[in-house]
Amino acid sequence: MTNSLFETAKPILETLQAHHYQAYFVGGSVRDYLMNKPIHDIDITTSATPDEIEAIFDKTIPIGREHGTINVVYNGEQYEVTTFRAEGDYVDHRRPNEVFFVRNLYEDVKRRDFTMNAIAMDINYQTFDYFEGQKDIKQHIIRTVGNPDARFGEDALRIVRGLRFQSQFGFQLEEATFNAMLHHIRDIKYLSIERIVVELEKLTLGNYVEKSFNNLKLFMTFKYIPFFKHFDLSKFSLTKAMSFTMFIAFLISQQREVNSNITDLELSNNDKKYIKKLVQLIELIDKIHTKKQLKLFVYDYGKKDILEVLSFLDVLELNQITSISPLILNYESVNEVAKQLPISSRSDMDINGKDILEVTNTTSGPWLKTILREVECAIISGEVCNFKPELKKWVKTRV
Ligand code: ATP
Ligand code: MG
């Protein structure tokens, strides 16, 4: 069966072949295609060197020239084209000290991490599977290409990647692969946190995350990762796929006493902000006992994030993170309250700081912030109508 993504990229391989170079699809897209899963980005591997790739195609971007990766822009899309390469000795368990461009596919797939990721496929969907990757896929096995001890010793990220694939596909770790993971787990302390997080972000979203998370715990992986090393992960059970940010928020909420620094994870500012918000939201959950409290809660944190957290109620309870008053706080009540909120943000208020100063005939000060919040709460609870004359009257009686 053909696949539209491979079909669209086909001309790139054909062009390379027309210039007498070899070219194949390789990596995650071939693996996912053979597993009948939707494929996303396509990787192309070729015997052409970066210079030769650039000479053939009009539009290229040298995104990783020294590693042999050139992006070819074709029909407005970018395709990653990488020269067949072999790797020199590894230093520090994370990066080869040099890479060599080679002209032979076998050398290229030999350096890849797992057998299922080392399958090349040509434009006719014929596979070149030197390490029985398809057999392993059929048998649901994750196995390194070559000696697992050597492969994890070279690059410890492969351990985290292996667990990430287990979470995504539910496969078993082949015995020697499993043992070598256990043996080399300490080496992940040499990895940059960014590379680890990229894999963990995919791991927590996997359908088989529970299985993989149990192995992460078994290997004591978190002991060797910044930020996580401060937490007691044995207390945490991850039984359901969730975003990495949600997982972090749950962990912080479960172990509030832990002195950790989220900046150690090198996340984006948006992610950090979101985690902080989730932690505050989770902290309030067991304090919502009345409809009035619920209204303010929904107003302050928004229906979307509250419902997202509520969808993990079982995980929250299992990990003893919080408890809930189910009659007050539930999917329906949040939806209902959200629909009836008189305003959705402060900018909807029919009164502002200037109005308040006018009414009270005073000068600005920190109290203004307090009274604005009081007005906001009164509008949300329905105590006062969001209508300027009413609001002014209400403020007068307060100050
Ligand atoms: P995804 O579908 O999530 O992108 P992927 O297998 O394509 O998964 P990538 O990080 O995109 O993962 O890597 C592309 C390919 O490069 C892999 O399939 C594998 O063949 C090879 N590869 C990636 N990282 C490593 C590594 N640390 N060691 C050896 N080979 C690797
Ligand atoms: Mg990929």
Image (cartoon, rainbow, N blue to C red):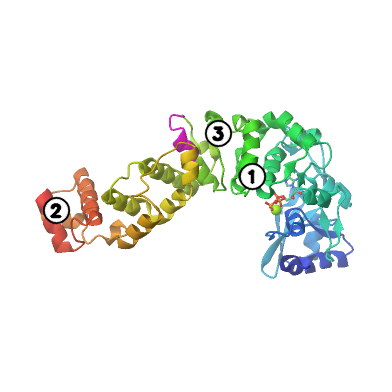
Label 1, ligand 1: CB separation under 8 Å: no
* Most foreground residue, 375 or 328: 328
Circle 3 packing at 10 Å, graded few (<14), some (14-19), many (20+), is many
* Placement of the N terminus among the 4 image quadrants: bottom right
Which amino acid type is marked by label 2?
Val
Q: Position of residue 95 (x, y in %)?
A: 73, 38
Query: Is 262 on the left or on the right of 128, as rendered?
Result: left
Q: Which residues are magenta?
A: 249-258
Q: To which residue does mark 3 refer?
A: 228
* Most foreground residue, 341 or 27: 341
User: Which of pointers 3 and 1 lies earlier in the amino acid sequence?
Assistant: 1
Spatial distance from mark 1 to mark 2, Cα to Cα? 53 Å
Which residue is drawn at the image coordinates 47% and 41% (left, top)?
A: 316
Q: How many marks?
A: 3
Residue 141: quadrant of the picture: top right
Q: Is residue 197 above or below residue 359?
A: above
Which amino acid type is marked by label 1?
Glu
Spatial distance from mark 2 to mark 3, Cα to Cα? 48 Å
Q: To which residue does mark 2 refer?
A: 395
Q: Are marks 3 and 1 in contact (CB under 8 Å)?
A: no
Q: Position of residue 322 (x, y in %)?
A: 41, 39
* Most foreground residue, 71 or 136: 136
Query: Is 111 on the left or on the right of 271, as rendered?
Result: right
Which amino acid type is marked by label 3?
Phe
Q: Is residue 101 visible?
A: no
Q: Is residue 187 above or below residue 212?
A: above
